[in-house]
Image (cartoon, helix red, strand yellow):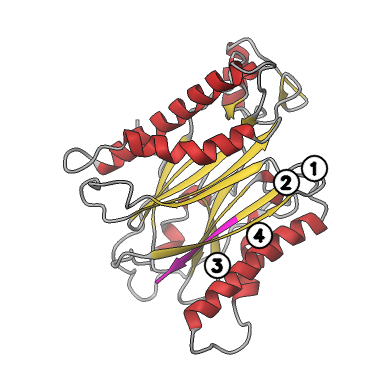
Protein backbone atom coordinates (compact mmCIF):
# COMPACT_ATOMS: atom_id res chain seq x y z
CA UNK A 1 0.00 0.00 0.00
CA UNK A 2 1.30 3.45 -0.85
CA UNK A 3 2.21 5.82 1.96
CA UNK A 4 -0.09 8.48 0.57
CA UNK A 5 -2.95 8.70 -1.86
CA UNK A 6 -0.48 11.02 -3.49
CA UNK A 7 -0.62 13.68 -6.11
CA UNK A 8 2.37 12.69 -8.28
CA UNK A 9 5.47 14.74 -7.65
CA UNK A 10 6.41 17.01 -10.55
CA UNK A 11 9.74 16.34 -12.24
CA UNK A 12 12.73 18.46 -11.32
CA UNK A 13 13.82 19.26 -14.87
CA UNK A 14 11.91 20.88 -17.75
CA UNK A 15 10.89 18.84 -20.75
CA UNK A 16 13.00 19.52 -23.88
CA UNK A 17 11.73 21.90 -26.51
CA UNK A 18 9.09 20.47 -28.78
CA UNK A 19 7.15 18.70 -26.05
CA UNK A 20 3.34 18.95 -26.13
CA UNK A 21 2.01 22.13 -24.49
CA UNK A 22 -0.20 22.18 -21.44
CA UNK A 23 -3.70 21.04 -22.23
CA UNK A 24 -5.31 23.57 -19.90
CA UNK A 25 -7.84 22.85 -17.14
CA UNK A 26 -9.90 19.66 -17.31
CA UNK A 27 -13.59 19.89 -18.09
CA UNK A 28 -15.51 20.46 -14.89
CA UNK A 29 -19.01 19.49 -13.84
CA UNK A 30 -21.73 22.00 -13.13
CA UNK A 31 -21.76 21.00 -9.45
CA UNK A 32 -18.41 20.83 -7.68
CA UNK A 33 -19.91 19.05 -4.70
CA UNK A 34 -20.57 15.63 -6.15
CA UNK A 35 -17.33 14.69 -7.85
CA UNK A 36 -13.82 15.93 -8.48
CA UNK A 37 -12.43 16.29 -11.98
CA UNK A 38 -11.33 12.92 -13.36
CA UNK A 39 -7.82 14.04 -14.20
CA UNK A 40 -7.15 15.97 -10.98
CA UNK A 41 -5.09 13.31 -9.23
CA UNK A 42 -2.74 13.01 -12.21
CA UNK A 43 -2.44 16.75 -12.66
CA UNK A 44 1.06 17.22 -11.22
CA UNK A 45 2.72 15.38 -14.09
CA UNK A 46 1.96 14.68 -17.75
CA UNK A 47 0.71 18.00 -19.04
CA UNK A 48 2.80 19.80 -16.42
CA UNK A 49 6.21 18.37 -17.25
CA UNK A 50 7.62 21.84 -17.85
CA UNK A 51 7.11 22.86 -14.21
CA UNK A 52 9.98 23.19 -11.78
CA UNK A 53 9.87 22.40 -8.10
CA UNK A 54 10.33 25.50 -5.96
CA UNK A 55 13.83 25.92 -4.58
CA UNK A 56 13.41 28.71 -2.03
CA UNK A 57 11.01 28.52 0.92
CA UNK A 58 7.72 30.12 -0.08
CA UNK A 59 5.55 32.32 2.10
CA UNK A 60 1.77 32.42 2.29
CA UNK A 61 -1.00 34.89 2.97
CA UNK A 62 -4.47 33.73 3.97
CA UNK A 63 -7.69 35.54 3.08
CA UNK A 64 -11.01 34.42 4.61
CA UNK A 65 -14.65 35.24 3.90
CA UNK A 66 -17.63 33.80 5.79
CA UNK A 67 -21.28 34.20 4.89
CA UNK A 68 -24.32 32.90 6.77
CA UNK A 69 -26.41 32.53 3.61
CA UNK A 70 -30.03 31.72 4.44
CA UNK A 71 -29.16 29.77 7.59
CA UNK A 72 -30.10 31.10 11.03
CA UNK A 73 -26.51 30.85 12.26
CA UNK A 74 -23.01 30.45 10.90
CA UNK A 75 -22.03 26.87 11.74
CA UNK A 76 -18.68 26.93 9.91
CA UNK A 77 -15.29 27.61 11.44
CA UNK A 78 -11.75 28.02 10.15
CA UNK A 79 -8.17 28.05 11.38
CA UNK A 80 -5.07 29.82 10.08
CA UNK A 81 -1.90 29.13 12.08
CA UNK A 82 1.86 29.43 11.80
CA UNK A 83 2.88 26.34 13.77
CA UNK A 84 6.61 26.95 13.55
CA UNK A 85 6.94 28.69 16.92
CA UNK A 86 4.84 26.11 18.74
CA UNK A 87 6.65 23.19 17.10
CA UNK A 88 10.12 23.38 18.65
CA UNK A 89 12.37 21.65 17.97
CA UNK A 90 11.13 21.20 14.41
CA UNK A 91 11.10 17.79 12.71
CA UNK A 92 14.23 16.99 10.71
CA UNK A 93 14.61 18.81 7.37
CA UNK A 94 11.65 21.16 7.98
CA UNK A 95 12.16 24.86 8.63
CA UNK A 96 8.53 26.05 8.73
CA UNK A 97 5.02 24.66 9.29
CA UNK A 98 1.83 26.49 8.31
CA UNK A 99 -1.73 25.27 8.75
CA UNK A 100 -4.99 26.25 7.05
CA UNK A 101 -8.38 24.60 7.61
CA UNK A 102 -12.11 24.99 7.01
CA UNK A 103 -14.75 23.13 9.03
CA UNK A 104 -18.35 22.91 7.80
CA UNK A 105 -20.54 22.28 10.81
CA UNK A 106 -23.99 20.71 10.81
CA UNK A 107 -26.48 20.17 13.61
CA UNK A 108 -24.88 23.14 15.34
CA UNK A 109 -21.57 25.00 15.38
CA UNK A 110 -19.90 23.31 18.36
CA UNK A 111 -18.10 20.51 16.49
CA UNK A 112 -16.69 22.92 13.91
CA UNK A 113 -15.49 25.38 16.56
CA UNK A 114 -13.99 22.56 18.63
CA UNK A 115 -12.09 21.20 15.63
CA UNK A 116 -10.84 24.67 14.68
CA UNK A 117 -9.38 25.13 18.17
CA UNK A 118 -8.08 21.63 18.83
CA UNK A 119 -7.19 19.66 15.69
CA UNK A 120 -3.90 21.42 14.99
CA UNK A 121 -2.99 21.36 18.68
CA UNK A 122 -3.49 17.60 18.75
CA UNK A 123 -1.38 17.31 15.61
CA UNK A 124 1.48 19.17 17.29
CA UNK A 125 1.27 16.87 20.30
CA UNK A 126 1.63 13.82 18.04
CA UNK A 127 4.35 15.11 15.70
CA UNK A 128 7.85 13.75 16.49
CA UNK A 129 10.47 16.45 16.98
CA UNK A 130 14.10 16.56 15.93
CA UNK A 131 15.89 13.92 13.89
CA UNK A 132 14.78 10.40 13.20
CA UNK A 133 12.50 8.62 10.75
CA UNK A 134 10.66 9.68 7.62
CA UNK A 135 9.05 13.11 7.71
CA UNK A 136 6.29 11.95 5.35
CA UNK A 137 5.41 8.98 7.56
CA UNK A 138 5.55 11.10 10.70
CA UNK A 139 3.24 13.78 9.30
CA UNK A 140 0.70 11.31 7.98
CA UNK A 141 0.59 9.32 11.22
CA UNK A 142 0.34 12.52 13.26
CA UNK A 143 -2.56 13.77 11.12
CA UNK A 144 -4.42 10.46 11.42
CA UNK A 145 -3.86 10.35 15.18
CA UNK A 146 -4.92 13.98 15.57
CA UNK A 147 -8.20 13.40 13.76
CA UNK A 148 -8.88 10.33 15.92
CA UNK A 149 -8.10 12.14 19.17
CA UNK A 150 -10.11 15.24 18.23
CA UNK A 151 -13.14 13.12 17.33
CA UNK A 152 -12.95 11.02 20.48
CA UNK A 153 -12.55 14.02 22.78
CA UNK A 154 -15.40 15.94 21.19
CA UNK A 155 -17.71 12.91 21.29
CA UNK A 156 -16.90 12.43 24.98
CA UNK A 157 -17.74 16.05 25.69
CA UNK A 158 -20.88 15.88 23.54
CA UNK A 159 -22.14 12.76 25.30
CA UNK A 160 -21.72 14.36 28.72
CA UNK A 161 -24.20 17.12 27.94
CA UNK A 162 -27.92 16.98 28.77
CA UNK A 163 -29.28 16.64 26.19
CA UNK A 164 -26.29 15.24 24.33
CA UNK A 165 -24.89 17.37 21.54
CA UNK A 166 -25.53 16.04 18.04
CA UNK A 167 -23.18 18.40 16.21
CA UNK A 168 -20.83 17.21 13.49
CA UNK A 169 -18.44 18.79 11.02
CA UNK A 170 -16.51 18.13 7.84
CA UNK A 171 -12.84 19.08 7.70
CA UNK A 172 -10.47 20.21 4.99
CA UNK A 173 -6.96 20.87 6.31
CA UNK A 174 -3.80 21.88 4.46
CA UNK A 175 -0.51 21.59 6.30
CA UNK A 176 2.44 23.24 4.56
CA UNK A 177 5.86 21.87 5.51
CA UNK A 178 8.24 24.24 3.70
CA UNK A 179 7.09 23.77 0.06
CA UNK A 180 5.15 20.50 0.47
CA UNK A 181 1.38 20.44 0.93
CA UNK A 182 -0.14 17.71 3.08
CA UNK A 183 -3.92 17.64 2.71
CA UNK A 184 -6.28 15.83 5.10
CA UNK A 185 -10.03 15.87 4.68
CA UNK A 186 -13.32 14.40 5.83
CA UNK A 187 -16.66 14.92 4.14
CA UNK A 188 -17.47 17.21 1.22
CA UNK A 189 -15.46 20.36 1.85
CA UNK A 190 -12.74 20.77 -0.76
CA UNK A 191 -9.25 22.07 -1.48
CA UNK A 192 -8.15 23.20 -4.95
CA UNK A 193 -4.77 24.29 -6.25
CA UNK A 194 -4.41 26.85 -9.06
CA UNK A 195 -1.36 25.99 -11.18
CA UNK A 196 -0.40 28.25 -14.08
CA UNK A 197 1.34 27.14 -17.25
CA UNK A 198 4.19 29.61 -17.69
CA UNK A 199 4.10 29.39 -21.49
CA UNK A 200 0.36 29.51 -22.17
CA UNK A 201 -0.57 31.45 -19.01
CA UNK A 202 -3.59 29.19 -18.65
CA UNK A 203 -4.63 27.78 -15.27
CA UNK A 204 -5.10 24.15 -14.41
CA UNK A 205 -7.28 23.32 -11.42
CA UNK A 206 -5.97 20.45 -9.30
CA UNK A 207 -8.30 18.85 -6.77
CA UNK A 208 -6.33 18.20 -3.58
CA UNK A 209 -9.06 16.39 -1.66
CA UNK A 210 -11.44 13.46 -1.99
CA UNK A 211 -15.10 13.92 -1.15
CA UNK A 212 -16.85 11.43 1.13
CA UNK A 213 -20.56 10.92 0.66
CA UNK A 214 -22.70 7.81 1.15
CA UNK A 215 -23.54 7.48 -2.54
CA UNK A 216 -19.97 6.36 -3.28
CA UNK A 217 -19.67 2.59 -3.49
CA UNK A 218 -16.95 2.01 -0.90
CA UNK A 219 -18.50 4.45 1.54
CA UNK A 220 -21.97 2.92 1.12
CA UNK A 221 -20.63 -0.63 1.58
CA UNK A 222 -18.89 0.34 4.83
CA UNK A 223 -22.08 1.92 6.13
CA UNK A 224 -24.14 -1.14 5.24
CA UNK A 225 -21.61 -3.52 6.81
CA UNK A 226 -21.91 -1.51 10.03
CA UNK A 227 -25.67 -1.96 10.03
CA UNK A 228 -26.61 1.43 8.61
CA UNK A 229 -28.33 2.23 5.35
CA UNK A 230 -28.35 4.91 2.70
CA UNK A 231 -31.64 6.53 1.69
CA UNK A 232 -31.99 9.47 -0.69
CA UNK A 233 -28.20 9.74 -0.82
CA UNK A 234 -27.88 10.20 2.95
CA UNK A 235 -26.93 8.03 5.91
CA UNK A 236 -30.23 6.87 7.42
CA UNK A 237 -31.83 9.38 5.08
CA UNK A 238 -30.40 12.29 7.13
CA UNK A 239 -26.61 12.76 7.08
CA UNK A 240 -25.21 13.90 3.74
CA UNK A 241 -21.58 12.92 4.40
CA UNK A 242 -20.08 9.52 5.23
CA UNK A 243 -17.05 10.77 7.22
CA UNK A 244 -17.02 13.52 9.81
CA UNK A 245 -15.90 14.68 13.22
CA UNK A 246 -18.65 14.40 15.82
CA UNK A 247 -22.04 12.99 14.72
CA UNK A 248 -22.00 10.51 17.60
CA UNK A 249 -25.40 9.10 16.71
CA UNK A 250 -24.08 7.99 13.31
CA UNK A 251 -20.76 6.46 14.35
CA UNK A 252 -22.44 3.09 14.95
CA UNK A 253 -23.73 3.28 11.36
CA UNK A 254 -20.29 3.34 9.73
CA UNK A 255 -19.61 7.09 9.70
CA UNK A 256 -15.89 7.37 10.48
CA UNK A 257 -13.37 10.09 11.27
CA UNK A 258 -10.42 8.66 9.27
CA UNK A 259 -9.31 11.31 6.76
CA UNK A 260 -7.86 10.85 3.31
CA UNK A 261 -4.33 12.26 3.27
CA UNK A 262 -2.56 13.50 0.15
CA UNK A 263 0.85 15.01 -0.52
CA UNK A 264 1.62 17.59 -3.21
CA UNK A 265 4.93 19.44 -3.77
CA UNK A 266 4.46 23.05 -4.84
CA UNK A 267 5.94 24.27 -8.10
CA UNK A 268 6.93 27.67 -9.47
CA UNK A 269 3.64 27.99 -11.33
CA UNK A 270 1.38 27.57 -8.29
CA UNK A 271 -0.63 30.69 -7.45
CA UNK A 272 -3.05 29.87 -4.64
CA UNK A 273 -4.92 27.17 -2.75
CA UNK A 274 -8.67 27.49 -2.32
CA UNK A 275 -10.33 25.79 0.66
CA UNK A 276 -14.11 25.98 0.94
CA UNK A 277 -17.16 24.24 2.34
CA UNK A 278 -19.75 22.68 0.06
CA UNK A 279 -21.87 25.83 0.24
CA UNK A 280 -19.52 27.40 -2.31
CA UNK A 281 -19.63 24.41 -4.63
CA UNK A 282 -23.41 24.43 -4.72
CA UNK A 283 -23.02 27.66 -6.70
CA UNK A 284 -19.65 27.17 -8.44
CA UNK A 285 -17.81 24.34 -10.12
CA UNK A 286 -14.16 23.95 -9.16
CA UNK A 287 -12.95 25.62 -12.36
CA UNK A 288 -15.49 28.44 -12.09
CA UNK A 289 -14.37 29.25 -8.54
CA UNK A 290 -10.67 29.31 -9.43
CA UNK A 291 -11.22 31.36 -12.58
CA UNK A 292 -13.42 33.79 -10.65
CA UNK A 293 -10.52 34.48 -8.28
CA UNK A 294 -8.03 34.79 -11.13
CA UNK A 295 -10.25 37.23 -12.99
CA UNK A 296 -10.21 39.54 -9.98
CA UNK A 297 -6.49 39.45 -9.29
CA UNK A 298 -5.16 39.73 -12.85
CA UNK A 299 -5.14 42.82 -15.06
CA UNK A 300 -6.75 45.14 -12.54
CA UNK A 301 -5.01 48.38 -13.31
CA UNK A 302 -1.31 49.16 -13.43
CA UNK A 303 1.17 47.77 -10.91
CA UNK A 304 1.91 50.04 -7.98
CA UNK A 305 5.19 50.67 -6.22
CA UNK A 306 3.89 48.45 -3.46
CA UNK A 307 3.03 45.66 -5.85
CA UNK A 308 2.95 42.82 -3.31
CA UNK A 309 0.64 44.73 -1.00
CA UNK A 310 -1.56 45.62 -3.94
CA UNK A 311 -1.79 41.95 -4.94
CA UNK A 312 -2.69 40.96 -1.39
CA UNK A 313 -5.53 43.46 -1.49
CA UNK A 314 -6.73 41.97 -4.78
CA UNK A 315 -6.78 38.46 -3.32
CA UNK A 316 -8.61 39.73 -0.24
CA UNK A 317 -11.20 41.39 -2.44
CA UNK A 318 -11.53 38.34 -4.69
CA UNK A 319 -12.12 36.08 -1.68
CA UNK A 320 -15.00 38.23 -0.41
CA UNK A 321 -16.46 38.68 -3.88
CA UNK A 322 -16.47 34.92 -4.40
CA UNK A 323 -18.39 34.35 -1.17
CA UNK A 324 -20.83 37.14 -2.01
CA UNK A 325 -21.41 35.76 -5.50
CA UNK A 326 -22.12 32.27 -4.13
CA UNK A 327 -24.86 33.74 -1.92
CA UNK A 328 -26.18 35.85 -4.80
CA UNK A 329 -26.42 32.71 -6.95
CA UNK A 330 -28.67 31.12 -4.36
CA UNK A 331 -26.36 29.12 -2.11
CA UNK A 332 -28.68 28.84 0.88
CA UNK A 333 -26.04 27.10 3.01
CA UNK A 334 -23.24 28.76 4.97
CA UNK A 335 -20.36 29.73 2.72
CA UNK A 336 -16.76 29.83 3.97
CA UNK A 337 -13.95 30.61 1.55
CA UNK A 338 -10.26 30.52 2.51
CA UNK A 339 -7.80 31.58 -0.19
CA UNK A 340 -4.13 30.87 0.57
CA UNK A 341 -2.06 33.15 -1.65
CA UNK A 342 1.34 31.67 -2.53
CA UNK A 343 4.03 34.34 -2.44
CA UNK A 344 7.32 33.96 -4.29
Chain-order first, disc 2 or disc 4: 4
Judge whether residue 263 is colored magenta: no
**What secondary structure is found at the residue carrying circle 4?**
helix
Horizontal side, residue 172 vs residue 55: left or right: right
Q: What residue did someone put label 4 on?
A: 289
**What secondary structure is found at the residue carrying circle 3?**
strand
Considering every residue shown, the one lying at the far left of the view is 131
Q: Are marks 1 and 2 in contact (CB under 8 Å)?
A: yes
- Name the mark nearer the viewer: 3 or 1: 1
Residue positioned 43% across, 56% down in the render: 44
Query: Which numbered disc covers residue 71?
Result: 1
Q: Is residue 311 above or below residue 241?
A: below
Q: Quadrant of the C terminus?
A: bottom left
How crowded is the residue under tag 2: few (<14 C-alpha within 10 Å), some, or many (20+)? Answer: many
How crowded is the residue under tag 3: few (<14 C-alpha within 10 Å), some, or many (20+)? Answer: many
Chain-order first, disc 4 or disc 3: 3
Residue positioned 43% across, 43% down in the render: 262
Horizontal side, residue 18 vs residue 308: left or right: left
Q: What residue did someone put label 3 on?
A: 203
Residue positioned 53% across, 36% down in the render: 115
- Name the mark nearer the viewer: 4 or 1: 1
**Closer to the camera, 78 or 327?**
78
- Name the mark nearer the viewer: 2 or 4: 2
**Most common secondary structure along the magenta stretch:** strand
Chain-order first, disc 1 or disc 2: 1
Q: Are marks 3 and 2 in contact (CB under 8 Å)?
A: no
The CA distance from mark 3 to mark 1 is 34 Å
**What secondary structure is found at the residue carrying circle 2?**
loop
Query: Which numbered disc covers residue 334?
Result: 2
**Closer to the camera, 166 or 260?**
166
Can residue 116 be seen in this snapshot? yes
Chain-order first, disc 3 or disc 1: 1
Amino acid sequence: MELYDELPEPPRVPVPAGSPPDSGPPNGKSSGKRRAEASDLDGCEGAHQEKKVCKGILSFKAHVAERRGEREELQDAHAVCDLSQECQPMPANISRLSYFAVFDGHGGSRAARYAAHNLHQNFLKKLPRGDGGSVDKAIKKSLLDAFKQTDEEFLKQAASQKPAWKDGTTAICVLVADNILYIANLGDSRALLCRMNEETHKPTVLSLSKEHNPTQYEERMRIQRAGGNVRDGRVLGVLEVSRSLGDGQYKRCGVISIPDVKRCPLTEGDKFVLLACDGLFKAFSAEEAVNFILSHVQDEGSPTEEGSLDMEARYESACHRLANEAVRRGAADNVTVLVVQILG
